[in-house]
Amino acid sequence: MAAIKRAASLVRAVQVVSAGGPFQIVEREIPEPGAGQVRIKVQACGVCHSDALVKDGTWPGLQYPRVPGHEVAGVIDALGAGVSAWTQGQRIGVGWHGGHDNTCPHCRRGDFFNCRNQKVAGISYDGGYQEFMIAPVEALVAIPDSLNAVEAAPLLCAGLTTYNALRHSGACPGDLVAVQGIGGLGHLGIQFAARFGYRVAAIGRKPEGATLARRLGASLYIDSESERPAEALQRQGGAQVILATAPSSKAMSQLIDGLRPNGKLVVIGLTFDPIEVLPVQLIAGYRGIQGWAAGTPADADDTLRFAEQSGVRPMIETYPLERAAEAYARMMSGKAEFRVVLTM
Ligand SMILES: [Zn+2]
Ligand SMILES: [Zn+2]
């Protein structure tokens, strides 16, 4: 391909032109940060299943064209007016939580993630599928020195979600915790659960999953094709927590009987059909079902620091920015092992 000579101020971005439309690589003027914002020189951006909300147009009211990407790692390239807590050249990231208003009823109670005017990076404004991105300071996460950008990126959504869901699940060290699905979320969930001191059961769909599950930290592997996971968990006394990561409501429904009394099914795999449960399954043994979504940039700080300290790392496949369409297709195929990351 012939090299395109571009003006110094033009930078590359990959945008979705319309709902259901293709990815398009464009050159644009380098953006300028406004008050309370920074410009990020993006080094890596994870490709997350939620980017389908932009690609398919399933996020209500989304404005096109839009640059997706909410697993962004890079360095601060320029500071907008009034930014004092961050410095030029600092290594930072941006995850799903792309900003909040500090004034709504939920923010007033410190629950920033549930802000009524929450902004989402790559949805409310252009995200990380580009060389330079603008973000508000309340969305920033500091990246520890020992994590490189490619490793840090998937930790800002997939890592944060599994880490935060597990640490708020109520499970204590030594408890049996099951992680259903060994994919983009599950392979991180198993690692975090093991580092938290849980006894980890990994639930996969083929016998070959056992070796990887053990390497990630699981002490027990359940092949859901050859045995019923709920029964296998009950033979171990039942799970205190089951982290459901694979997007199958049917599989999730079949897990509930694997909980021990007071146990909880924590749902992070996004599906659009119902989980089926009889009231008696919940009433007997006070069992519960809870959903969990990512977390704030402060939670992401904790995720990165814990990953640094404990050695939790994502398994990744990298693609250069100009191959974003191929990278996205690979992620959507479900065959990537396990997170797809764009590099700039
Ligand atoms: Zn995501
Ligand atoms: Zn708010």
Image (spheres, grey):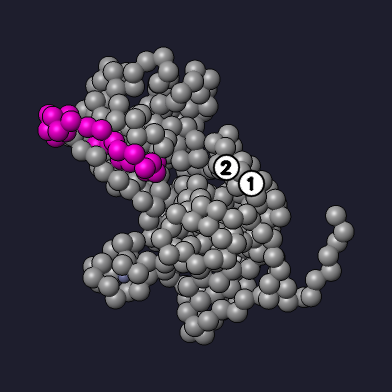
**Quarter of the rendering occupied by the C terminus:** bottom right
Q: Is residue 243 above or below residue 91?
A: above
The answer to whether residue 167 shows anywhere in this view is no
Q: Are marks 1 and 2 in contact (CB under 8 Å)?
A: yes
Q: Nearer the viewer, residue 127 or 186?
A: 127
Q: Position of residue 226 (x, y in %)?
A: 41, 14
User: What is the C-alpha distance between the residues marked 1 and 2?
Assistant: 6 Å
Residue 331 got which mark? Answer: 2
Does 57 appear above or below 41?
above
Question: The magenta stretch spans which residues?
Answer: 264-286
Kind of element beneath mark 2: helix
Our reading of the magenta stretch's main secondary structure is loop
- Where is residue 101, by image quadrant? bottom left
Q: Which residue is mark 1?
A: 327
Q: Amino acid at mark 1?
A: Ala
The residue depicted at 36 percent of the width and 42 percent of the height is: 272
Q: Which residue is found at the position 58% from the left and 34% from the top?
A: 335
